[in-house]
Image (spheres, grey):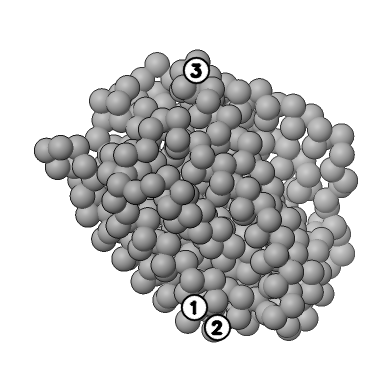
Amino acid sequence: MMPLGPQFTRLFAISDAQFGLLVSAYTLSAGVSGLAAATYVDRFDRKRLLLTLYVLFALATLACGLAPGYGFLMAARVAAGMFGGVLSALSQTIVADVVPFERRGRAMGIVMSSFAVSTVAGVPAGLYIANQLGWQAAFIAIALLSALLAGGAALTLPRLDSHLRGAHRPSAWRGIAMVLSERNHLEAFGFSALMMFAGFLVIPFITIYLQANVGLTDEQIPLIYLCGGLATLVSARVVGHLTDRIGKVRTFSLLAVLVVLPLLAMTLLRPAPLPLVLLVSTLLFVLLSGRMIPGMALVTSAADPALRGTFMAFNSAVQSAAMGAASFLGGSIISRDAAGLVQHYWVSGLIGATASLVSIGLARRLVLHGGIAGRPA
């Protein structure tokens, strides 16, 4: 959705703020569905729930590709967010369930590498398909690919129901009350929200800004995501190993400080040679995604293992709300002058940089737990 910003603003004759709402609709919907998921996510086999939600997500994505106008597309994005938000929480819960604390940084590095692969292959391919066949074709292609992946997952994933066995589990509402009454959980939610808020003030409008202010063409935009994805594919594994070697808090703190520079540089870029633009954008992608590896290792480890599914559902809601709020705020901050140039983007960068630095303090306050046994780390 975000790399297609210039096409949507042009084809639907909408403002940058309306496009920001289109982006935030997904995340805000995911936040609401995450809250609802807290009542049931720990009551089912994780594999069965994962596959059900994934199929529904694919159908909602197909509806995006069939949307005849802005209103229908908005509704389809809301539906996709309802299922996608819970999927995110569920996948992270599975990682935390099956991977011991000592190797969780590397596990999160592998997950982030997968996101990098999707960026390297998916974003340029999606932009190419959209440029050649229209924006609808990109969503339809995603839906078809999702159908294939759902079939593969059904055949290869093992049963994931260990959380349903053994000790007596509290009721859904009792579990929710236990999650929300724990101060460490609430601080983890605040930390998670700041991580997302810092990036999504800037990320949704990168393509719009680079084309309007820096002068990149439609053909050059895929290079931004290709270079960023390739670099992240390598860096995610490195950050994962570093996270387990020197510590999750120390690694996160380092990356949260370093990301300030490309955050500000991206929002202050002027017409510049393409290699310089690629350097800034690649650094931004590497550091934004890199800090998520120790960050999510911290968040999953802050949860009481007996309540991890419910906790992660709430965390997904918090993250989605933060992304949606940041996208909406970012769209409200920027404006266009008479020449069509984006104004005040640097304000979003400054707020995002501040949020990144503040998140370090919360990271240092979290009490961490080990794997299934829940021993303090």
Q: Is 251 on the left or on the right of 338, as rendered? A: right
Q: Which of marks 3 and 1 is in front?
A: 3
Residue, x 73% and y 74% (percent of image)?
Answer: 244
Asked if disc 1 and disc 2 are in contact, CB closer than 8 Å, the reply is yes
Q: Is 85 on the left or on the right of 206, as rendered? A: right
Residue density around tag 2, few if under 14, some if 14–19, many if 20 or more, within 10 Å: some
- The image shows residue 312 at horizontal and vertical percentages of 62, 60
Q: What element carries label 3?
A: helix
Q: What element carries label 2?
A: loop
Amino acid beneath label 3: Gln
- The image shows residue 120 at horizontal and vertical percentages of 61, 41
Residue, x 25% and y 25% (percent of image)?
Answer: 13
Amino acid beneath label 2: Arg
N-terminal of the pair, mark 3 or mark 2, is 3
Q: Name the residue under label 2.
A: 364
- Tell me the distance, in whole angstroms, between the alpha carbons under discs 3 and 2: 48 Å
